[in-house]
Image (cartoon, grey):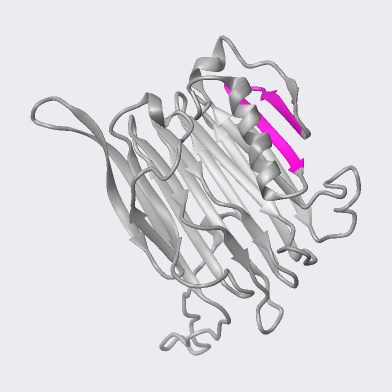
Amino acid sequence: MTVDEISVGSPAASADGGRPVPQQVSGMRAQARVATELRTSPGGRQRSCVSTLRSQAPLALRLTRAKAREPWAAHAADIARVSLAAGAGGPVGGDQLILRVEVGPGSSLVLSEISPTLLLPGPRGERSATHVRIQVAAGATLIWLPEPIIAARGCDHVHNVVVDLDEGARLFMREELLLGRHGEETGRVTQRVSVRHGGRPLYRQDIGIGTAGADTPAVIGHHRAVGSALIVDPSWLSDPPSARALPGDAALLPLSGPAALITASAGDNLELRAQLHAGLTALGPPWDPGR
């Protein structure tokens, strides 16, 4: 199911065709949308500006400054920066959240998060869901730096991300998933990522945590944290990065297209973040935030 197939809070029609009858729903329904465009001042200077910023609790979008070194962003000027803050706890079982991101032609957006996301069980055992739909136009750049998702015991969550990149678009997308809080069994999470580049499939990843067989060596084994960083760089069309092993259980893998994937599994979030950073260091500028 993609974000376009989700109906949030829409009333159902009555049987006799009269006034709509409100549906009884459990959990919160919320949407948020951010869009950017490239504007030119009277003096001819170009800058990326936020043209749309709308959100509903628990999704809260705010204009912010950089809070740490960012991949690629140090090599560009006039970047728009927005952070997603938690306006309430969760998602809790039964919640349905939708985030739309649109990066207009030639503009650049750094989208970050203020804090990790804690997935919690609902009072009736319902499944929660977060649907993210991203569109990045030609010549545009999105640097997406979400904080870790923590699957608390008893949660049941679907995290679905669909990304459409035009030719010439640039993308950095990080994902980190922690299997429960300290000393806690993990909940159930299904994470799906689908990326298209120029209308063609570029990357598809499905992972199920807390399901039968997830703790086997073929999936995550004994690890408590799993994550990845997907980088799409038009400059790699003629000179793609090479595959290499990274420290720990991590690797840098070139994809069929101007893209590379850093994938890692670790014992905790600190180790996981270090492994992903090692992959960026291997890529070098402009993706290494330390250089």
Residue drawn where x is 50% and y is 30% of the image: 289
> Residue 80: percent from the left, percent from the top?
32, 41
Picture coordinates of residue 212, whole percent (x, y): 89, 59
In the shown orientation, is residue 234 left or right of residue 106? right
- Residue at point 46% right, 69% down? 58
Q: Position of residue 285 (x, y in %)?
A: 50, 20
Q: Is residue 101 above or below residue 209?
A: above
Q: Tell me where residue 106 appears, x and y as whole percent.
A: 33, 29
Q: Please give left or right for residue 44 compared with residue 91 in the image.
A: left
Q: Is residue 225 left or right of residue 56?
A: right
Q: Which residues are magenta?
A: 250-265
One can see residue 138 in this view? no
Residue 253 in magenta stretch:
yes
Asked whether 24 or 136 is in front, the reply is 136
Is residue 140 in view from this perspective? yes
Q: Is residue 68 magenta?
A: no
Residue at 71% over, 79% down: 125
Majority SS type along the magenta span: strand
- Quarter of the figure with the N terminus: bottom right
